[in-house]
Image: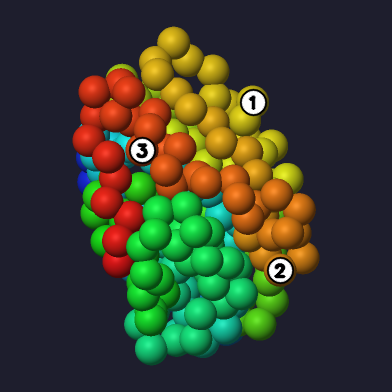
Amino acid sequence: MDFKRLGDWTPLLREELQKPYLSALNDRVEKARQSTEVYPPAGREFFALEATPPEAVRAVILGQDPYHEPQQALGLAFAVARGVALPPSLRNIYAELQADTGLTPPDHGDLTAWAQRGVLLLNTVLTVERGKANSHAKWGWQRFTDAVIRATNCLPQPIVFVLWGAQAQKKASLLQTQAPRLVLNAPHPSPLSSYRGFFGSRPFSKSNEFLTAHGEAAIDWSL
């Protein structure tokens, strides 16, 4: 994996990057790529951090692990490549986006524009084997992404943390700071849980209300 792609995140993660587990994780992912298909493609493992440098972060949306079917995973939580059918969770996110903001959902699942506007779309596990959800969940990725979450939490600017589902909400314990923060909890947007409170949670407008109240520009959620 190309850790140089971490860019401006590198100084904030310098201590973590020197820990032995991360070298072992890198070796394991590289070995897996030699014998199986691993998503996202090589070079895209850190795309969420590459697309949203620390000084740009205004909101964080946490996902679990990458999509595990061919041509889906982009390296951004919940996003899929253009031309790929929208997964059910993303369809529900778009439905809530329209209900919350009035924006017409796009016909694609590429969320790169959000990332470029300061929305850190971070999965807690950054690789997966084809056809096997959560297959890399115990490889050490969560230790690394916990460090990313802590580093994000230490940034000086106002930030919204959007925690959808039980797995994401476990990260709330990492969010303790004096800086302006808003933590939005809701059920996961998957079909299994979306009707238990995800729909109607209004994360997009609530994020912008918080940001503008703290002197920041609202996020453009259009795609």
Q: Which-is-in-front pick, marks 1 and 2? A: 2
Secondary structure under badge 2?
loop
The residue at which mark 1 appears reads as 173
Mark 2 or mark 3: name the one nearer the start of the chain. Answer: 2
Distance between the alpha carbons at the discs numbered 1 and 3: 23 Å
Specify the amino acid type for callout 1: Ser
Could you say which quadrant of the image residue 13 lies in? Answer: top left
Residue 65 lies, in percent from the top left, at 59, 61
Q: Which-is-in-front pick, marks 2 and 3? A: 3
Specify the amino acid type for callout 2: Pro
Determine which of the numbered discs, if any, sits on residue 198 in the image. none
Distance between the alpha carbons at the discs numbered 2 and 3: 26 Å
Secondary structure under badge 3?
helix
Could you say which quadrant of the image residue 21 lies in? Answer: top right
The residue at which mark 3 appears reads as 208
Q: Is residue 36 above or below residue 126?
A: below
Whether residue 89 sits left or right of residue 133 in the image: it is left
Q: Is residue 185 above or below residue 49?
A: above
**134 or 205, which lies in front?**
205
The residue at which mark 2 appears reads as 191
Whether residue 141 sits left or right of residue 51 in the image: it is right
At 73% from the left and 45% from the top, the residue drawn is 166
Residue 80 lies, in percent from the top left, at 44, 75
Secondary structure under badge 1?
helix
**17 or 59, which lies in front?**
59
Mark 1 or mark 2: name the one nearer the start of the chain. Answer: 1
At 30% from the left and 66% from the top, the residue drawn is 223
Question: Badge 2: few (under 14), some or many (20 or more) residues near its Cα, within 10 Å?
Answer: few
Mark 1 or mark 3: name the one nearer the start of the chain. Answer: 1
Q: Which-is-in-front pick, marks 1 and 3? A: 3
